[in-house]
Image (tube, rainbow, N blue to C red):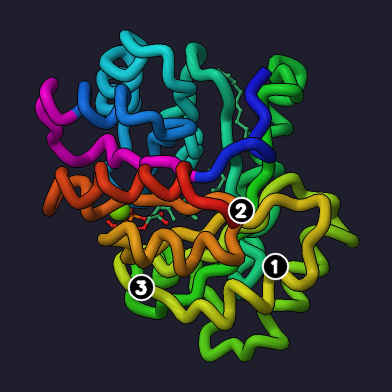
Amino acid sequence: MYDVREWRHVFKLDPNKDISDEALDSLCESGTDAIIIGGTDGITLDNVLNLMARVRRYTVPCILEVSTIDSVSPGFDLYFIPTVLNSTDTKWITGLHHEAVKEYGELMDWDEFLIQGYCVLNKDCKAAKLTSAKMDLSEEDVAAYALMAEKMFHLPIFYLEYSGAYGDPSFVKAAKSQLNETVLFYGGGIETLEQAEEMGNYADVVVVGNIIYKDLSAALRTVEIKKSNR
Ligand SMILES: CC(C)=CCC/C(C)=C/CC/C(C)=C/CC/C(C)=C/CC/C(C)=C/CC/C(C)=C/CC/C(C)=C/COP(=O)(O)OP(=O)(O)O
Ligand SMILES: O=P(O)(O)OC[C@@H](O)CO
Ligand SMILES: [Mg+2]
């Protein structure tokens, strides 16, 4: 029912940031393919549930990107589980996942869970610091992570993450060159339609986050990528 292979554009909302009803209405009615709820810090069950309830008034698919086990709740259309492939700490690759599955694995409807193989490329972003991600990767390194995501781990999603900064399209191209089955997400610093299109030349899905809170009209214009051909 919710097929990420058909997506082109998603908004990522941070439960730790305020958003007005009016702004949320325009995002949910924008024509974007989905609303992802996720962030790296200040994520609590309360702020996740609050935002989910507000997005739930609309028909747009609502996805929880899990960053803490305590903030998982029923009621989402899908759950994305990040694993940071270039983390140097196993906690963020399989560690927390093992603990969660050990405790809740029997309860999980596995069809609702999609694993995202993250490759974090902006050294200054919170996710890079939190997960002690390996930095200074070359295009060949990124291409190899993409190939691992698809051929070794058969992950449904490979996510090139530049959170907070606009990345290098040649790295997105390098990742895409290795992928046939795995869907390529790009996120980071997209503020204009032109940037969405540039990354969308290679990425299957572009993720738009921070600009929502800085310039809502600019964020809404990025949805027009859905009208353009790849
Ligand atoms: C449906 C239901 C009730 C089921 C119950 C069973 C259950 C609890 C299942 C959970 C299963 C499971 C395997 C959970 C995984 C647990 C876990 C905590 C995994 C670790 C995830 C991880 C690697 C987090 C690291 C950080 C990260 C990559 C986060 C992704 C989001 C991201 C990068 C946001 C960008 O950062 P942002 O905060 O926006 O940064 P700025 O503020 O700088 O913009
Ligand atoms: O917030 P921005 O920089 O748009 O990045 C989007 C998303 O990839 C963050 O996880
Ligand atoms: Mg953010």
From the top left corner, tell me how far across and down residue 26 is, in percent: 21, 27
Relative height, residue 149 to residue 73 (above, below): below
In primary-sequence order, the first of circles 3 and 1 is 3
Segment colored magenta: 9-23
> Which residue in the structure is indicated by mark 1?
176
From the top left corner, tell me how far across and down residue 206 is, in percent: 48, 53
> Which residue in the structure is indicated by mark 3?
166
Q: Are marks 2 and 1 in contact (CB under 8 Å)?
A: yes
Mark 3 residue element: loop
Report how far apart the C-alphas of labels 2 and 3 lie in the structure.
17 Å
From the top left corner, tell me how far across and down residue 109 is, in percent: 72, 17
Magenta stretch contains residue 15: yes
Q: Callout 2: few (<14), some (14-19), or many (20+) C-alpha neighbours within 10 Å?
A: many
Q: Residue at x 89, y 61 (%)?
A: 152
In primary-sequence order, the first of circles 2 and 1 is 1
Q: Amino acid at mark 1?
A: Lys
